[in-house]
Amino acid sequence: VLGTVMIPVSVQLVPNYLLMARLGWLNTLLPLIIPTSANAFGIFWMRQYMYSIPDELLDAGRLDGATEFGLYWRIVVPLVRPALGALALFVFTTSWNDFLLPLVYLRSQDTFTVQLMIDSIFRVKFQQNFHLLMSASVLAIIPMTILFFTLQKQFVAGLTVGSVKE
């Protein structure tokens, strides 16, 4: 996990491309979804969040006769739900705004992401129509804004938990 943080993305591009080609995932959305859903930031985020769960809660669950899976499912998962919501928003925002990885993995316009589609539509040889490009970029922000307002309660709860100690 730590190795993926220390090695720049530009160095990882060729090995990751070869791996995705071997898996048969080129020109699909899988190389954009699977690797980003379990990135190093998310692992560290959830680890630190789970360390903030008091051991007394888990001990009380054990005294009540819960199995380890029962502890996880009935105690830990409900407590980490705000962090999962915030993490989902971070990961989706990162994936939505990514330009480099879709440019490397996707070839046909049927699988292009919004950013690649905007680039391919408004790219003209030796000329950029910046007014159209910026208008399309504003339209591309709308789904992210809707997602944020939908998950705002969980997002704020995930960021502020543990900030006030009683």
Image (spheres, rainbow, N blue to C red):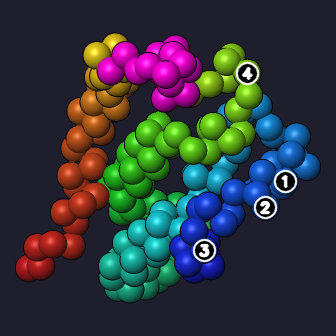
Q: CA distance from mark 3 to mark 4?
A: 29 Å
Q: CA distance from mark 1 to mark 2?
A: 5 Å
Label placed on residue 15:
2
- Image point 55% across, 27% down: which residue? 116
N-term mark: 3 or 1: 3
* Quarter of the rendering containing residue 166: bottom left
Q: Where are the magenta residues, as a range?
A: 114-130
State which quarter of the image contains the N terminus.
Answer: bottom right
Give the amino acid type for the residue marked by disc 4 in the picture: Ser
Give the amino acid type for the residue marked by disc 2 in the picture: Pro
Label 4: which residue?
A: 108
Callout 3 crowding tier (Cα within 10 Å): few <14, some 14–19, many ≥20:
few
Label 3: which residue?
A: 7
- Name the one closer to the observer, 33 or 130: 130
Q: Position of residue 12 (x, y in %)?
A: 68, 63
Callout 2 crowding tier (Cα within 10 Å): few <14, some 14–19, many ≥20:
few
Q: Magenta includes 48?
A: no
Q: Position of residue 63 (x, y in %)?
A: 46, 83
- Name the one closer to the observer, 130 or 96: 130
